[in-house]
């Protein structure tokens, strides 16, 4: 996720900014940059890759600048290159800006500025804002920023400097955190307290739609509409470690709890409820091919493969297109039949998984249209596809994939609605689906309220060495995912099954006290899954049910129940997976395992 740090005061700004950037490294980033006011001249230095690479290009100790802004970028619009890194400048080289968030209407703003002959150098939404501020600048930076933000749709946390006002930083926020650090004859600005905590623990938190203008000796806060606001100075009480984890004990826990926000970001600007449409900019050039597609093949590994399985059901349900899901490692070495009209979708959080990359290459070589559903912008898979949709869920640091799974399902749901609407789905049916999809983040928040109960269940059964996970229909992939989460971080043997398969062999495993997690939410096969619960109970299994809120009969059948809010059946996986992530997380802790770095596993499997 992107990070901002800025300084204005009496000290050398550059060493302080570089140190601040290093403090932001834990958030994940792919490029970085600084803009310094060197003797009334703006100097911007940026680089792709690590901060140490940027540092090599800077004269950190020699810089005399006392004002500057800096940024770590996690790419969303445009690949992680030096040109796309922040700060971005305007055409007159007077303005520099760093930005966290997404400017949703950047295409329209860019068109407007291009008509005014403003030249662009990067692919980013952020440069549009920098250019707009430069275009509107008439000798007052605060006014130009205010005016530009009036035209912006989307989210932002920004810090802006101007060569004509060398001792000033203008900061503003909407939907992306920003705080001002208060020092002795100096102020700092940051997206995250960790970046400035070494210098001050006194901070002012900006609220949405607020601006701050800081210089060495003044802090002036207003709303974006120029109404003065008096802000309280607060003391940051967290240590640096606590801040990195935002109060959580592990990145996995943080990422589980980030899911509602991650999904809001994933859907932002894409789900159009009023029109009953999905806007997928990445598919603009292939929309006709998608509508005419005769077959979809999803290819992926691990958790991403489970998301692909949900995608198969979604595309067949909503898109009415035959869809298959293939393990990338198998697909690449088979002799797959790729007929005319085949679309291959590679699903990958990292975008670097070797088997998925090779499977995509194989399908492409045989004539398939190659699409990507990827989290890391500019990654190898993203670069190898004909078109793609990014997840926009932010960096995933814990080895166990959590928010990437729900992000992948959300993107696949949007793709299914996108294709379905072009084929046979009515506007009202699409609207109903998208309405339910847009409610998922709020419902996830309710599902996360299961945390304490999931912990109690995990602790009660953490000593059992074998678990089963059962689901039917849309819950079958969730059963697989729940079992994978448990085994990879707690080293408990767990198996996920389509519930009806149990009778064809695995039922022999059920013995007295064996934990069997059954996803038994309301849906087409509810009665059948209840029969499966009876079968497990009859053999002494301990049923841990995941059920829909308001289900009054399930508590009589299961030993433990975790309830999730109701939603349309195709969207349930994004809610039912949450208690399973929580159970796995707490079971791993109960067994003393290293949650974020489980043994024998790497976050990204770049070799076969
Ligand atoms: O980066 P990718 O999504 O391509 O990774 C695929 C799998 O290696 C990954 O999902 C793995 O199964 C997870 N660690 C499971 O939590």
Image (cartoon, rainbow, N blue to C red):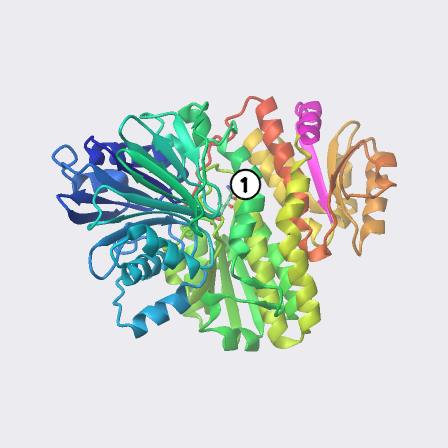
Where does the image place residue 566, in percent across and percent down from the top left? 75, 49
Write down the region rendered in magenta. 452-471
Asked whether residue 568 appears in the rendered view, the answer is yes
Q: Is residue 236 above or below residue 410?
A: above
Crowding around mark 1 (Cα neighbors within 10 Å: few <14, some 14 to 19, many 20+) is some
Q: Is residue 407 above or below residue 417?
A: above
Q: Is residue 262 left or right of residue 572?
A: left
Where does the image place residue 427, in percent across and percent down from the top left? 67, 72
Asked whether residue 607 appears in the rendered view, the answer is no
Q: Is residue 35 left or right of residue 253?
A: left
Where does the image place residue 521, in percent across and percent down from the top left? 77, 47
Between 604 and 236, the residue placed more toward the observer is 236
Where does the image place residue 35, in percent across and percent down from the top left? 23, 46
Between 377 and 192, the residue placed more toward the observer is 192
Q: Indicate yes or no whether the magenta region holds residue 179.
A: no
Q: Furthest-front residue in view? A: 228
Between 277 and 318, the residue placed more toward the observer is 277
Between 502 and 57, the residue placed more toward the observer is 57
């Amino acid at each position: 996720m992107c990070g901002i740090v800025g300084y204005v005061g009496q000290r050398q700004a550059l060493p302080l900014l570089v140190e601040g950037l290093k403090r932001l490294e834990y958030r994940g980033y792919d490029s970085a940059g600084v803009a310094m006011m060197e003797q009334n001249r703006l100097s911007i230095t940026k680089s792709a890759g690590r901060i140490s690479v940027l540092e090599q290009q800077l004269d950190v100790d020699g810089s005399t600048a006392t004002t500057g802004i800096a940024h770590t970028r996690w790419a969303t619009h445009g690949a992680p290159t030096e040109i796309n890194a922040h700060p971005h400048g305007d055409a007159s080289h007077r303005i520099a800006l760093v930005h966290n968030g997404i400017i949703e209407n950047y295409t329209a703003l860019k068109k407007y500025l291009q008509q005014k002959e403003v030249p662009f150098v990067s692919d980013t939404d952020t440069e549009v804002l920098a250019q707009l501020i430069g275009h509107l600048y008439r000798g007052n930076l605060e006014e130009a920023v205010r005016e530009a933000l009036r035209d912006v749709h989307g989210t932002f946390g920004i810090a802006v400097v101007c060569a004509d006002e060398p001792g000033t930083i203008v900061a503003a926020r909407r939907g992306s955190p920003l705080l001002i650090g208060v020092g002795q004859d100096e102020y700092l600005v940051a997206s995250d307290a960790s970046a400035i905590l070494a210098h001050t623990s006194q901070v002012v938190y900006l609220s949405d739609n607020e601006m701050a203008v800081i210089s060495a000796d003044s802090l002036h806060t207003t709303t974006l509409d120029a109404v003065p606001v008096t802000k309280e100075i607060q003391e940051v009480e967290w240590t640096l470690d606590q801040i990195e984890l935002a109060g959580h004990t592990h990145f996995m826990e943080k990422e589980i709890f980030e899911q509602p926000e991650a999904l809001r970001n994933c859907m932002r600007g894409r789900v159009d409820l009023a029109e009953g449409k999905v806007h997928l900019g990445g598919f603009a050039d292939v929309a006709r091919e998608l509508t005419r597609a005769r077959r979809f093949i999803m290819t992926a590994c691990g958790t991403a493969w489970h998301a692909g399985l949900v995608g198969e059901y979604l595309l067949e349900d909503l898109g009415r297109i035959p869809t298959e899901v293939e393990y990338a490692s198998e697909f690449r070495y088979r002799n797959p039949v790729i007929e005319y009209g085949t679309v291959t979708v590679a699903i990958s959080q990292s975008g670097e998984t070797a088997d998925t990359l090779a499977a995509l290459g194989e399908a492409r070589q045989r004539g398939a249209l190659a699409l990507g559903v990827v989290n890391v912008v500019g990654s190898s898979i993203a670069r190898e596809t004909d078109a793609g949709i990014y997840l926009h869920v932010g960096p995933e640091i814990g080895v166990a994939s959590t928010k990437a799974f729900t992000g992948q399902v959300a993107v696949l749901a949007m793709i299914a609605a996108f294709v379905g609407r072009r084929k046979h789905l009515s506007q009202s049916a699409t609207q109903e689906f998208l309405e339910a999809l847009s409610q998922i983040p709020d419902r996830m928040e309710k599902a996360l309220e299961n945390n304490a109960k999931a912990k109690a269940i995990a602790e009660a059964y953490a000593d059992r060495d074998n678990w089963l996970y059962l689901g039917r229909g849309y819950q079958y992939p969730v059963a697989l995912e729940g079992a994978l989460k448990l085994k990879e971080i707690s080293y408990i043997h767990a198996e996920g099954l389509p519930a009806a398969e149990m009778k064809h062999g695995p039922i022999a495993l059920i013995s007295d006290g064996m934990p069997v997690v059954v996803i038994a939410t309301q849906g087409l096969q509810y009665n059948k899954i209840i029969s499966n619960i009876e079968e497990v109970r009859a053999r002494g299994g301990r049923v841990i049910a995941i059920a829909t809120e308001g289900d009054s009969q399930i508590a009589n059948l299961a030993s433990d129940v975790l309830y999730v809010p109701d939603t349309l059946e195709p969207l349930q996986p994004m809610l039912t997976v949450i208690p399973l992530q929580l159970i796995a997380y707490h079971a791993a802790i109960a067994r003393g395992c290293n949650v974020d770095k489980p043994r024998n596993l790497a976050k990204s499997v770049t070799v076969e």
